[in-house]
Image (tube, grey):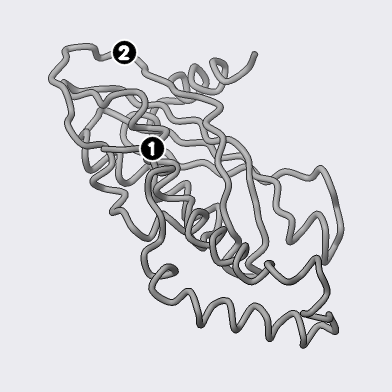
Amino acid sequence: MAGMKDYVNASVGRNREQIEHHVREILKLIGEDVEREGLLETPARVTRMYEEIFAGYEVNPRDVLGVTFDEQHEELVIVRDIVYYSQCEHHMAPFFGKAHIGYLPSGKIAGLSKLARLVEAVTRRLQVQERITTQIANILDDTLEPHGVMVVVEGEHLCMCARGVKKPGSKTVTSAVRGEFRTSPALRSEFLALLKD
């Protein structure tokens, strides 16, 4: 499967004129002069941006892992520091950070790049960080049927940093554990230790 960068949100493309119209109206409603040189192309730019940042609606995240491989490796596999960008569904403000994925295979493994693509498929839509974490863990657990899965997601939310309580630099950390990660403190500790530089 191609990377998410190859996908665009087709619904946005089909509704381009309406979206541009509404962006223009919002600009007017906040007191802007939509005829000002710097804003003339803004509705079109916002629409093109929506095609890209909401591309996750064009793919079923469960299909992203694609082909799995039979492999008798049954030790911990971790892909860490997967950078993501998403949009908060409450304020439509950006949030971004890193996802760390670990799983204990039980005979099936996924291509490592597929884990990064899974993160993109889940994050490129209106989201909350808690759901991102749960969805990634559930999809891996269902698809690979591993002995265990652990997902840790870190995020910096502009809806909290740039508005509201205005606490820049604050980070939110969420985790989801499945299988042996849930029952083995030693396995959880190994995963967390391997996340450190």
Q: Quadrant of the N terminus?
A: top left
On screen, residue 79 above or below 37: above
Q: Is residue 27 above or below residue 112?
A: below
Q: Position of residue 70 (x, y in %)?
A: 13, 20
Instruction: Please provide percent x and percent y for residue 19.
Output: 54, 77
Q: Amino acid at mark 2?
A: Glu
Left or right of 88 on screen, residue 140: left
Instruction: Name the quadrant containing residue 137.
Output: top left
Image coords of residue 144 (percent x, y): 22, 33
Dot 2 or dot 1, earlier in sequence: 2
- Return the residue at label 1: 117
Q: Quadrant of residue 105?
A: top left
Label 1 residue SS: helix
- Between 74 and 39, the one lying in front of the other is 39
Give the crowd class for mark 1: few <14, some 14-19, many >=20 residues within 10 Å.
many
**Residue 30's mark?**
none
Query: In the depicted view, which residue is nearer to us: 50 or 136?
Result: 50
Position of 14 compared to 64: left or right? right
Crowd around label 2: few <14 · some 14–19 · many ≥20 (10 Å):
few
Identified at 64% across, 44% down, the residue is: 155
Q: Please, what secondary structure does the residue beneath circle 2 have?
A: loop
**In this view, the mark in front (2 or 1):** 1
**Residue 75 image label:** 2
Q: Residue at x 51, y 82 (%)?
A: 18
Q: Residue at x 24, y 29 (%)?
A: 146
For badge 1, the amino acid type reads Arg
Quadrant holding the C terminus: top right
Q: CA distance from mark 2 to mark 1?
A: 22 Å
Near-viewer residue (12 or 155): 12
Seen at 65% across and 51% down, the residue is 95
Q: Quadrant of residue 106?
A: top left
